[in-house]
Amino acid sequence: MPALLLADDFWFCAHDDVSGRCRLGPRAVGSGLAAALLAELVLAGGVDIENGEVVVVENRPPGEDVARAVFSEVAGEREVRAVREWLRYLGHHAYARVAHRLLRAGLVRSRSAGFLGRSTVYPPVDVNVAAWPRARLGLSVPGRPRWADVPIHDVVLSGLVVATGLYPVVFPDAPASTRDHVDGLVARLPRPLRALVVDTDTAMGVAVLHHRI
């Protein structure tokens, strides 16, 4: 299977493997994708999270188009902004950006849907590729009790899956202890990645409280 970027993996977890229909509401999927895009920059060494704020640590932008666009927005901001502000802001555009990246990569196609074709869905080109991120997490995370045995990429992805409400979809048959196991893995992430997952979870809690999800 092709190795996908974190936001691409989250996209496929959040969408039906065949129809391409999203399993989440706009706020949840936008926040999850925004967090994943920021995590890509953290993993690439472009940004860090300090005291709950996103700070640039590398002046050279990433090579990938979407990552470069997100990095440029963060680097171009005059004031240092909190993670939650960036999740809210980037969440408005993250869906379209990741969809475009997947279209360019030939991993999804676009199709008109809804009343009079006014909405767009993105069915996967290869069902196996679309199902792999979810299947990989479902197989590997519950069966690997040690933190060191689970790739950081998959720990972050699992944390975002839980934060956005995708846990029953990704881990439908996992032991009851799996949720606590994921929480334990996230707790041992490097500080900036842990902060992204925690702030995404907090943002979802606030959205539910105000009926915005």
Image (cartoon, rainbow, N blue to C red):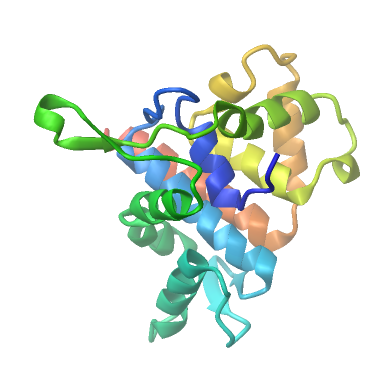
Give x and y (percent) for residue 174: 71, 16
Above or below: residue 200 compared with residue 178: below
Residue 81 appears in the rendering? no
Which image quarter: residue 182? top right
Which image quarter: residue 15? top left
Which quarter of the rendering shows the C terminus? Answer: top left
Q: State the residue in front, 60 or 83.
A: 60
Above or below: residue 148 compared with residue 100: above
Give x and y (percent) for residue 123: 41, 32
The residue at the point 35 percent across, 33 percent down is 208
Question: How many dots with numbers?
Answer: 0
Which quarter of the rendering shows the N terminus? Answer: top right
Q: State the residue in front, 16 or 29.
A: 16
Give x and y (percent) for residue 117: 15, 32
Query: Is residue 192 found left or right of 89 in the rendered image?
Result: right
Query: Is residue 164 found left or right of 172 in the rendered image?
Result: left
Query: Is residue 91 found left or right of 210 in the rendered image?
Result: right
The residue at the point 52 percent across, 36 percent down is 12
Which image quarter: residue 118? top left
Above or below: residue 184 compared with residue 81: above
The residue at the point 51 percent across, 54 percent down is 35
Q: State the residue in front, 191 or 103.
A: 103
Residue 138 appears in the rendering? yes
Give x and y (percent) for residue 181: 76, 30
